[in-house]
């Protein structure tokens, strides 16, 4: 199995986190794809502190996935700067892990669940060093946490959508990164998988790790996130979900008809 955009990172880096620096700092970032005449992102500035669990929301085409790719170094910055724990983002990606959209992964690749989760250790191993006991223990612990240890030798192509998403999150746990980026992790997964994902993210942020989750599921924001960032090419609003998700903002961004009594965090 591989990500359609290629492997993000396969080397080692030992740059320490700079003290008193945020997990992620995005400053005046703009981006335009070479084939386009329109900006995907415009003057985006965002700071995420250690231990924060942030929901990144916005309509399709708002630039959420592009912003994640820029943090990962999968796209070259057009303007602005991005730092992770005080270092230039592309300088040392061992601190960043991603759960990509399921649609961006080639699930037909003939690998087992254990092999996919072990990919999370490549950042520590490089490409040619064989996994050791520490790596195998990390992989087992990650599969246990996501309740997929019994699927370890199964081919990923044989799994359900919810099981595949658990595999991708287990790979990220095995990476043991300090900043985690999840791109639409709740799409097409069962309720038990959603709850396990949220439980895992809450545990990680309680340990001081930072998490950013791109999602369209507005109903979960006030329950599982203390902060929401509304992105539509630029940052429209940033703060507690109930302050960000005003009826007017949602109606404008998603094309809903505005009703004064509509509240997205309580409506089904």
Image (cartoon, grey):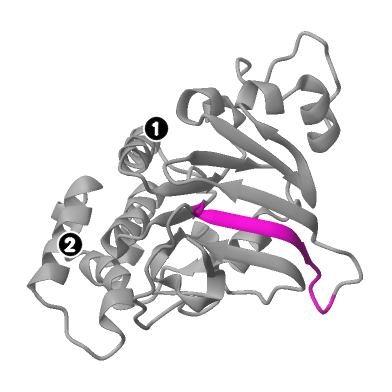
Left/right placement of residue 238 relative to residue 141 reads right
Give the image location of residue 165, x and y in percent: 39, 52
Question: Which x, y percent locates residue 86?
Answer: 51, 63
Q: Where is residue 87 in the image (x, y as percent from the top left)?
A: 51, 69
Query: Residue at left 39%, top 70%?
Result: 94
Q: Identify the mark nearer the N-term, 2 or 1.
A: 2
Indicate yes or no whether the magenta region holds residue 22.
yes
Q: Name the residue under label 2.
A: 138
Q: Nearer the viewer, residue 134 or 118?
A: 134
Q: Is residue 251 magenta?
A: no
SS for callout 1: helix
Going by the picture, which residue comes out furthest to the right?
37
Label 1 packing within 10 angstroms: few (<14), some (14-19), many (20+): few
Question: Relative to residue 205, is residue 81 depicted above or below?
Answer: below
Above-or-below relation of 257 to 211 = above
Is 138 placed left or right of 59 in the picture? left
Q: At x 25% / y 70%, what residue is drawn?
A: 118
Task: Spot the residue most to the left.
Answer: 133
Q: Which residue is at 30% across, 84% downward?
A: 126
Residue 191 image label: 1
| The residue positioned farthest toward the front in the image shown | 19
Q: Give the range drawn in magenta.
A: 21-35
Place residue 258 in its image quadrant. top right
117 and 206: which is toward the camera: 206
* Camera sees residue 147: no
Mark on residue 161? none
57, above or below 160, in the image? above
Most foreground residue, 226 or 233: 226
Disc 2/disc 1 C-alpha distance (Å)? 26 Å
Q: Quadrant of residue 217?
A: top right
């Amino acid at each position: 199995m591989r990500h359609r955009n290629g492997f993000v990172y396969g080397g080692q880096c030992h740059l320490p986190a700079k003290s008193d620096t945020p997990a992620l700092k995005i400053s005046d970032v703009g981006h335009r794809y070479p084939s386009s005449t329109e900006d995907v992102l415009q003057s985006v500035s965002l700071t995420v502190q250690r231990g924060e669990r942030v929901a990144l929301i916005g309509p399709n085409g708002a630039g959420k996935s592009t912003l994640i790719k820029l943090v990962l170094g999968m796209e070259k910055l057009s303007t602005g700067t991005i730092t992770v724990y005080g270092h230039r983002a592309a300088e040392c990606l061992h601190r960043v892990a991603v759960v990509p959209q399921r649609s961006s992964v080639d699930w037909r690749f003939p690998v087992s669940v254990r092999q996919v989760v072990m990919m999370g250790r490549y950042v520590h191993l490089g490409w040619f060093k064989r996994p050791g006991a520490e790596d195998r223990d990390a992989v087992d612990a990650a599969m246990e946490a996501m309740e997929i240890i019994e699927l370890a030798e199964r081919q990923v192509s044989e799994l359900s959508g919810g099981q595949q998403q658990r595999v991708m999150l287990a790979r990220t746990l095995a990476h043991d990164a300090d900043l985690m980026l999840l791109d639409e992790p709740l799409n097409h997964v069962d309720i038990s998988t959603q709850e396990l994902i949220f439980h895992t993210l809450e545990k990680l942020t309680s340990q001081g790790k930072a998490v950013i989750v791109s999602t369209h599921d507005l109903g979960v924001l006030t329950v599982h996130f203390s902060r929401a960032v509304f992105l539509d090419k630029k940052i429209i609003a940033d703060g507690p979900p109930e302050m960000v998700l005003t009826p007017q903002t949602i109606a404008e961004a998603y094309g809903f008809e505005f009703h004064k009594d509509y509240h997205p965090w309580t409506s089904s």
